Image (cartoon, rainbow, N blue to C red):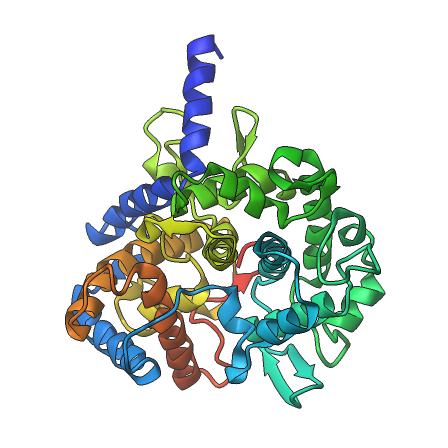
Amino acid sequence: MSETADEAALEAARYLLSAAAIRERSAALFARIEDGSSEHFAFAPEAMGPIADMVAALTRERFADLEVPFHSRWRHFEAGGIDRFASLAAARGWASPAEAARAMGDLAIVSVLLDAGAGPLWRYHEAATGETIGRSEGLALASFAMFAAGSFSAVPADPLRADAAALDSIGSDEFADGFQIGPDNPLEGADGRRALLASLADAVRLAPDLFAVEDDPRPGGIIDALAAEAVDGALPAPAILEAVLDGLGPMWPGRLTLAGQPLGDTWLYPALGDGSPGSDLVPFHKLSSWLSYSLIEPLSVRGVTVTDIDGLTGLAEYRNGGLFVDGGALRLRDPAAAASPHAVDEPLVVEWRAATVTLLDRLAPMIRERLGVDAATLPLASILEGGTWLAGRRLAQQKRSDASPPIGIISDGTVF
């Protein structure tokens, strides 16, 4: 490539690593579904009203005062109405908000990266409560218990942290014990998840400006780096995602690259290509976006006000996506396609995920109208929590005995 072509490719890569690109590229792809060009999906706009009714009713049922928290990993640590981290923090007694926020960042990053779909069979038994729970909440409680036990720390005197030295030394037996994996309790993508911890260790070592805490590579160091970017104590939410994608980009082996930049959760969709660099690519950055939402609370503890929450997008995953398929707004042109699982890079899955992002944006004002609130009161992050993901799960429970998504995904534990 010429120097100009190199520059254009690098600019395209930087764009694809942004929240704006998720929203804009998803909308461009969804336009093909809406105009009937898609081979896989048709859009039924008349189904959007009933879906909005369902989510609005569920939101009011769960949050009568409509003070809905942001969708984040912290809600899962509160499963069953128990604020587990608050109890842990009270016992630990960090010396400063910065220390507490750093530890929260450690926990959030490790837990979110282990949060890809668990599959329908896996369950986690929490000894303290006697509860047995699966899927995302179960994964959260398993990772929380490992954090509380010091599994992610190489400093015995300071167990409530995560650091590179510990993350890349967790063996398969320790991981299996922590997540209670066995022949009768299989966890989808278990090897991929454990490998992610080692990849996280490498990533935090490679980016000391983002992650090092006094020469100590820790995931939670990103909280200090983000706090330093704040202007007058405020930081726009899309800047969190950009930092996450910049710092954790090297973690995703075998993914697409452009101009030497790893693109993470970005997938080829040739029908959008116009010959310009990156025009045939669609980014989703699901885990990174979920992580960005989950870093808002640690930043708040650190004293940073996060603004432009709606600059982030909805999450392109199977519960929000399932809401629109099971709710009838997205219809498979070939219903038989739901009978077998699909790889994440298949056009059908790329279309489904792009439609999820765009339809969440369209659904948000409909839900606000039904609840009589504005975007400042109910940003997209609160609509997700209120919420679209739970509505998707409830529809799945009604339609399939194992509550599986309407379209099966072949997961390696690093995307969904």
Q: Quadrant of residue 257?
A: top right
Q: Relative to residue 243, is residue 7 depicted above or below?
A: above
Report the residue at 46% width, 30% height from top.
Answer: 13
Q: Position of residue 90 (x, y in %)?
A: 63, 72
User: Residue 143 at x, y = what percent?
Assistant: 67, 67
Instruction: Judge by depth and name the residue closer to the eye, 158 or 40.
Output: 158
Please give the name of the residue rendered at 77% of the width and 76% of the height, measured from the top-left corner.
Answer: 182
Q: Residue at x 82, y 62 (%)?
A: 172
Question: Does 68 sit above or below residue 43?
Answer: below
Residue sitting nearer the eye, 99 or 163: 99
- Farthest residue toward the bottom? 130
Residue 247 visible: yes
Q: Position of residue 112 (x, y in %)?
A: 57, 59
Q: Is residue 401 above or below residue 337?
A: below
Q: Is residue 408 found left or right of 374 in the rendered image? A: right
Q: Nearer the viewer, residue 119 or 365?
A: 365
The answer to whether any part of residue 139 appears in the image is no
Task: Please state if 119 lies on the left or on the right of 22 as rendered.
Answer: right
Q: Residue furthest top?
A: 2
> What residue occupies the far front of the structure in this picture?
95
Q: Residue at x 18, y 68 (%)?
A: 373
Give above or below for 262 relative to 196. Answer: above
> Image check: 177 left or right of 366?
right
